[in-house]
Image (spheres, rainbow, N blue to C red):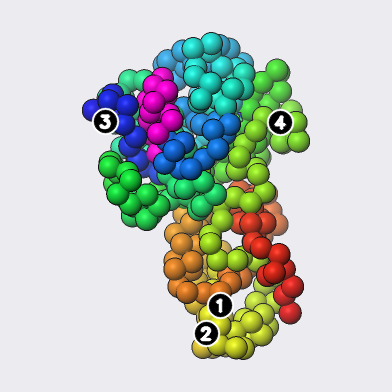
């Protein structure tokens, strides 16, 4: 808290992923966040608040739909994009006329935000383009000594970044899927909730290659995994597999993670699993395609982006 006051940057846990936070009204602090993350400065940040009590200091207008969602889902894994108040720094909004706001539920985040009183600008606490951290040790892996304060709140309960919904110009749009699904949003607001369009506000997560481990990754159909493992590992190369079941048969050169079929567990473990497989010395990761149903949208979204970051040489699977 002292550190935030002094314009320092602090990593803290939220129920989604760890954040790299700084005083949202302090340009120096926000610049430090960009510098640490090595993130391009035009990518806007989420402002974290302890509750909706000072929301009007950040948003010049809170449409009825936004107020409804805030009432229902805050504190929780939901970010609302609203028309910005004039005093919000351009560095935070990326110069846009909107600002992203979230009220996290994690007790340690709540404690920090309440004691601080103001808004904390915080992206996920990973270097630009990397997998988000869901444990304090992941944050250490990302930044090492470059980051002085990391608050350790254990494992993040949700494990995937918040659902982002924009409420601008009378339209409600889902910009980034998360634990809170499109169906849940529609239950609150009706079918008028749309999804992102090419002209929708910028979400760098929506740049194709994002959330990527450093090992090339491919999504593969359930029935193809064993055949591909056998063929790819023929020369003694180690293959990583993230599946929802155990392997059929035994393979010598495979690190196989069975993430199970329960969505909440799968989400909770996804980034930690990708980090584990990344470290296992594998030449490529095969990820079993996840179920098509809408509840899995958020997971599918992250996996598809991770696969999109894979260089083309890995494109030709046998
Ligand atoms: O769960 C989360 O949201 C985590 C935790 C730490 O709160 N934070 C997070 O931050 O995922 P970050 O920076 O990795 O992703 C925030 C996303 C970005 O894709 C950014 O473009 C989008 O929010 N965003 C921020 N302000 C926006 C705005 N005004 N309009 C549209 N998108 C915005
Ligand atoms: Mg991020």
Residue 62 appears anywhere in the view: no
Q: Which residue is mark 4?
A: 200
For residue 42, which quarter of the picture?
top right
Residue drawn at (48%, 68%), measured in percent from left and top?
Answer: 277
Precedes in sequence: disc 3 or disc 2: 3
Establish if 159 lies above or below 113: below
- Name the residue that disc number 1 marks: 239
Q: Does the CB distance between marks 4 and 2 fall below 8 Å?
A: no
Q: Residues within 10 Å of mark 4 (few under 14, many from 20)?
A: few
Mark 1 crowd level (few <14, some 14–19, many ≥20, 10 Å Cα): many
- Quadrant the N terminus occupies: top left
The secondary structure type at the circle numbered 3 is: helix
Vertical position of residue 96 compared to residue 218: above or below: above
Q: CA distance from mark 4 to mark 1?
A: 38 Å
Residue contact between numbered discs 1 and 2, judged by CB atoms under 8 Å: yes
User: Mark 1: which secondary structure?
Assistant: strand
Q: Quickly name the residue at label 2.
A: 253
Asked if the stretch drawn in magenta spans residue 27, the answer is yes
Question: Label 1, label 3: how many angstroms apart (C-alpha)?
Answer: 43 Å
Decide which of tag 4 and tag 1 comes sooner along the chain: 4
Residue 124 magenta-drawn?
A: no
Q: Position of residue 44 (x, y in %)?
A: 55, 31
Question: Is the residue marked 1 within 8 Å of ligand 2, measured from its CB?
Answer: no
Residue occupying the point 50% across, 62% down: 274
Q: Which residues are magenta?
A: 19-32
Looking at the image, tell me whether mark 1 or mark 2 is earlier in sequence order: 1
Q: Which residue is mark 3?
A: 3
Determine whether the residue tagged by mark 2 lies in a helix, strand or loop: loop
Neighbor class of circle 2 (other Cα within 10 Å; few <14, some 14-19, many 20+) is some
Q: From where the camera sits, is residue 172 visible?
A: yes
């Amino acid at each position: 808290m002292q550190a935030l006051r002094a314009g320092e940057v602090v990593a803290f846990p939220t129920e989604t992923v760890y954040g790299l936070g700084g005083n949202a009204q302090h340009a120096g602090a926000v610049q430090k966040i960009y510098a640490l993350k090595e993130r391009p400065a035009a990518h806007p940040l989420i402002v974290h608040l302890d509750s909706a009590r000072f929301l009007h200091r950040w948003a010049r207008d809170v449409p009825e739909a936004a107020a409804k969602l805030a009432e229902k889902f805050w504190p929780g894994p939901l970010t609302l994009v609203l028309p910005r108040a004039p005093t919000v720094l351009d560095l935070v909004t990326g110069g846009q006329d909107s600002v992203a706001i979230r009220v996290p539920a994690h007790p340690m985040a709540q404690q920090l935000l309440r004691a601080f009183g103001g808004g904390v600008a915080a992206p996920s606490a990973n270097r630009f383009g990397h997998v988000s951290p869901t444990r304090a040790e992941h944050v250490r892996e990302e930044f090492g000594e470059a980051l002085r304060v990391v608050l350790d709140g254990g494992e993040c309960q949700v494990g995937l970044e918040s659902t982002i919904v924009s409420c601008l110009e009378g339209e409600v749009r889902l910009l980034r899927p998360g634990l809170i699904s499109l169906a849940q949003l529609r239950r609150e607001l009706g079918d008028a909730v749309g999804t992102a369009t090419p002209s929708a506000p910028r979400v760098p997560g929506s740049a194709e290659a994002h959330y990527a481990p450093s090992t090339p990754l491919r999504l593969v159909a359930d029935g193809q995994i064993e055949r591909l493992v056998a063929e790819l590992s023929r020369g003694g190369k180690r293959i990583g597999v993230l599946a929802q079941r155990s392997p059929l048969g035994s393979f010598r050169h495979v690190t196989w993670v069975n993430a199970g079929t329960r969505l909440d567990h799968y989400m909770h473990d996804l980034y930690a699993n990708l980090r584990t497989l990344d470290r296992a010395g594998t030449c490529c990761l095969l990820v079993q395609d996840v179920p098509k149903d809408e509840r899995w949208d958020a997971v599918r979204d992250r996996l598809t982006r991770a696969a999109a970051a894979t260089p083309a040489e890995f494109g030709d699977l046998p």
